[in-house]
Structures are given as structure tokens and as C-alpha cells.
């Protein structure tokens, strides 16, 4: 058995509610990947006696194995040799006990997965010490927070940093899950000193529908660039400050800014790699320097300030999730009545989801094809990956240079 590596301070997983939020969010996320057509889970928070099998969460034996494997990977329960107990225990509370027992022995590393469009993503291992190093800096940006309102899942690295580690660092009164509240209800629940952790798609709804916010409310946004117009709209309804965080599952946080259109400023433990424009250097808590590849094109205004100029891997963000239009196009091309397709993010004035241009195969009935597109994609793609509007035509739109061009929004496809 591994030697204990837990500090004498109250560990994150020992704080009331933290481990339950993490595990519940991970289970729900895994179920959404295992059942891309959709699955209804019980309202959270889940009771400790909630069964994992068909009587409760509805997991069959293969699904339980998949979810248990994901939880073991995330919390490194194998380091304590306790992971097999997840396949024996039958209830949510018992899984929490297994996780707590494993973390009490070893909690020095965690694994987060990128939000890839194929539902699995890439595993990214981080030391708890490096995450705590980042949180020590983040705490200086939001020192007055009394409560944290969370609109993001706790098992993703952004949510873990800001809704698990940061509240502990700041000594916040409580962490509230507000993902199932309307913007209007959220605004009524806010009070001075609150810190709302969210992502751009949610901030758009808050700016549009919440109305006037109480004085002294701060916000944090990440997972995708926040349009300057949204930041200005939030300021207009009373948000005192919006901190924008740039980073990724691979790197954790890299830089922050608190003013729309301003450059990002590197966190103090990051620096540029003079020998490689596509890499950054991070100095860890013990002084060790690590090189990290970055996924975006960065334009530097000073040695420590930069602007983000687009993805190198061509991923786009939908609701805080990385999706890859080229992969979704390949799924569409698998339909026997589709000859060609193009997928891209909607223009800002059109929405915040994907749209697709479809070229029907010779002899295909365009009306029948349009009618079945929802069921076809629902069975093969997760919710963020599904185009929400389709345009059909004889050929893909191209500009004078022969390159693919944008197209007007087609009729929206809605689920039943």
C-alpha cells in the first residue's frame, strides 16, 4: 500500500459536500457519454442510499464498470489499492466511502479529461500541489468572496479549482450549485460578496435575463473566450468584476484578465519559452520547470501579456465543452443519404451551438432527410456535438478562392 501523502490541514475531500459534488458530477457526466441519446437521472443532491443499479441510477454491470473506472482514474484510487471495492459496493454513499478511504491514503495527484467531442477526451494528470499553487494566486484575485455559486461541474479542472479548492482557501461560507436555476431565480438568490463561477454560454443568459444584480457580486468565466459584448452587458446589469481565465485541462490556468478587450496576464509561475513559440514554461511548487505545449495561437504585447488568436487544433466551444467540427462531419457523412457536409459554430447573432450544411446524395428526398436528421444525430452524438440548425443545398458554399464559406442559418431542428 502506498505511503500516506495527505497534509495535516483539512483535505479538500474531507470538507463537507465537496467529495459528493465531485463524484456525482463525474457519474452524471459518464452516464451522458455512455447514453448519448439522453438519460434522466435523479435530481441532485443524491441521497447516500441511492442505488447504483436499475432501482436507482439505472446502471447495468458494464456501465458500472465504466463509471467505476473513470472514478478510479480521476481520484487515483489505485494508488491505495482500494479501487475494486467500487464494483462491490451498491450505493452512492458507499462509493463516497470508498473514495474517501482511498484519498485518505493518497491524494497527491488527480486526473482530469479534456472535454473531447468523442466523449472520452484525453487524460491530464495534475499534482494537487500544483493546483494549490494556482489557487493561492487565484485567491488574491477574489479575496472578498463569501459564497461561491457554481454553474460548472466539480470534476472538470476549472470547476475543481474554483468550486472545490478556492472556497476552501478563502474560507467561504458555502458552495451552491446553481446549474438548475433560471437567470432570474439566480439573481434573486445572489447577495453581496457572492462569486459566480460559470462559462460564456451561461453568462450570455445571465446578461440577457437576470435583470439587475445585487451590488458586490463578482464572476469568473473560463472554458472559452468571453465576447467583449457579454462582459460589457454584465457590467451594465451590475456585475462588479468579471475575471476571465485562460487555460486548459492540460495546463490548468495560464493567465487572467478582468477587463474586456484587455490582454491576459500570465500567472506568476508561467513564462514564455524563448526557444519555442508554441510552448510555455511553468515553474512548479518545488522549483522544477516544466514545458507545456499550448493549443492556441498567442500574440504577445509584453513578456507577460498576451491575446488569444484562435485554436491550433480547430476545436470550438459549445456550452463549455470542446467539440471538433471535422469529427462531427464524419459522423454526418456516415448517413447513406448525405453526399457532403460542413459543420461550424453559429455566428454570434445566430446562437451558441453548431450548424451544418448538408448536400443530399443523388436521389435522396431532402424533406425526408431533414425530418430524420435529429434522430440520426441523437443516436450518435452527445448533446454539445449535435448541430441545432441544418441548411440543405446542391453544393457546399464556397468563396471566390474556392474555400468553404459561411452560410445563413437554416431551420432549427428540435428534439421531442
Image (cartoon, rainbow, N blue to C red):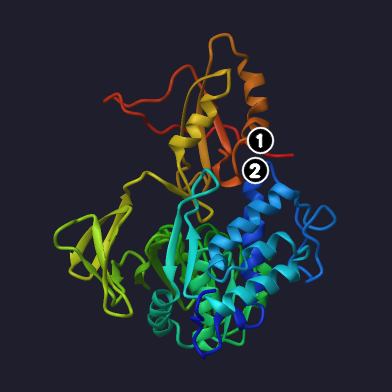
Question: Quick check: 308 above or below 105?
Answer: above
Answer above or below: position of 133 versus 346.
below
- Estimate the x, y position of residue 259 in percent, counting from the top left: 36, 71
- Which residue is painted at 32% across and 50% down in the image? 310
Q: The residue tagged with tag 1: helix, strand or loop?
A: loop
Q: Is residue 41 left or right of residue 147?
A: right
Q: Residue at horizontal 35%, vertical 45%? A: 313
Q: Residues within 10 Å of mark 1 (few under 14, many from 20)?
A: few
Q: Circle 2 — which element?
A: loop
Q: Position of residue 8 (x, y in %)?
A: 51, 90
Mark 2 crowd level (few <14, some 14–19, many ≥20, 10 Å Cα) = some
Q: Is residue 207 left or right of residue 401?
A: right
Work out whether 130 lies above or below 170: above
Q: Quadrant of residue 78?
A: bottom right
Tell whether 8 sits left or right of 376. Answer: left
The mark nearer the N terminus, 2 or 1, is 2
State yes or no: discs 2 and 1 in contact (Cβ < 8 Å). Answer: yes
- Tell me the quarter of the image containing the C terminus: top right
In x, y percent, where is residue 207? Answer: 54, 64
Residue at horizontal 19 percent and vertical 63 percent from the top: 273
Q: Residue furthest top?
A: 363
Q: 378 or 92: nearer the eye?
A: 92
Point out residue 319 in the picture as x, y percentages from the top left corner.
54, 54
Residue located beneath label 2 in the image: 36
Horizontal side of 281 relative to 222 (left or right) equals left
Q: Which mark is residue 379?
A: 1
Q: What residue sits 58% from the left and 68% below the top?
A: 81
Amino acid at each position: 500500500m502506498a505511503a500516506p501523502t495527505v497534509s495535516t490541514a483539512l483535505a479538500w475531500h474531507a470538507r463537507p459536500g465537496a467529495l459528493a459534488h465531485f463524484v456525482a458530477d463525474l457519474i452524471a457526466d459518464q452516464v451522458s457519454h455512455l447514453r448519448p441519446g439522453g438519460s434522466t437521472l435523479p435530481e441532485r443532491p443524491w441521497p447516500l442510499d441511492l442505488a447504483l443499479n436499475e432501482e436507482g441510477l439505472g446502471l447495468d454491470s458494464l456501465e458500472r464498470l465504466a463509471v467505476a473506472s473513470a472514478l478510479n482514474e480521476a481520484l487515483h484510487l489505485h494508488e491505495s489499492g482500494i479501487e475494486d471495492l467500487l464494483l462491490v459496493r451498491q450505493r452512492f454513499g458507499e462509493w463516497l466511502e470508498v473514495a474517501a478511504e482511498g484519498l485518505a491514503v493518497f491524494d497527491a495527484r488527480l486526473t482530469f479529461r479534456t472535454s473531447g467531442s468523442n466523449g472520452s477526451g484525453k487524460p491530464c494528470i495534475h499534482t494537487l500541489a500544483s493546483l494549490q499553487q494556482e489557487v493561492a494566486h487565484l485567491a488574491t484575485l477574489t479575496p472578498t468572496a463569501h459564497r461561491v455559486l457554481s454553474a460548472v461541474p466539480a470534476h472538470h479542472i476549472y470547476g475543481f479549482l474554483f468550486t472545490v479548492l478556492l472556497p476552501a482557501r478563502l474560507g467561504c461560507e458555502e458552495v451552491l450549485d446553481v446549474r438548475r436555476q433560471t437567470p432570474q431565480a439566480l439573481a434573486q438568490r445572489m447577495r453581496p460578496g457572492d462569486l459566480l463561477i460559470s462559462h460564456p454560454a451561461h453568462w450570455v443568459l445571465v446578461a440577457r435575463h437576470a435583470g439587475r444584480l445585487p451590488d458586490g457580486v463578482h464572476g469568473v468565466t473560463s472554458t472559452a473566450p468571453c465576447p467583449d459584448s457579454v462582459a460589457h452587458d454584465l457590467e451594465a446589469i451590475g456585475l462588479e468584476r468579471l475575471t476571465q481565465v485562460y487555460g486548459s485541462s492540460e495546463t490548468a490556468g495560464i493567465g487572467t484578465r478582468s477587463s474586456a478587450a484587455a490582454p491576459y496576464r500570465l500567472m506568476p509561475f508561467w513564462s514564455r519559452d524563448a526557444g519555442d513559440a508554441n510552448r510555455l514554461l511553468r515553474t512548479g511548487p518545488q522549483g522544477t520547470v516544466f514545458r507545456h505545449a499550448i493549443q492556441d495561437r498567442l500574440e504577445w504585447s509584453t513578456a507577460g501579456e498576451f491575446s488569444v488568436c484562435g485554436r491550433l487544433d480547430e476545436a470550438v466551444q459549445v456550452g463549455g465543452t470542446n467539440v471538433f467540427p471535422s469529427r462531427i462531419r464524419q459522423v454526418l457523412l456516415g448517413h447513406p443519404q448525405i453526399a457532403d457536409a460542413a459543420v461550424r459554430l453559429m455566428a454570434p447573432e445566430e446562437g451558441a451551438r453548431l450548424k451544418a450544411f448538408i448536400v443530399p446524395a443523388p436521389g435522396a428526398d431532402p424533406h425526408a432527410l431533414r425530418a430524420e436528421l435529429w434522430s440520426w444525430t441523437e443516436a450518435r452524438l452527445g448533446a454539445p456535438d449535435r448541430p441545432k440548425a441544418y441548411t440543405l443545398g446542391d453544393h457546399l458554399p464556397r468563396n471566390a478562392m474556392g474555400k468553404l464559406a459561411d452560410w445563413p442559418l437554416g431551420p432549427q431542428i428540435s428534439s421531442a
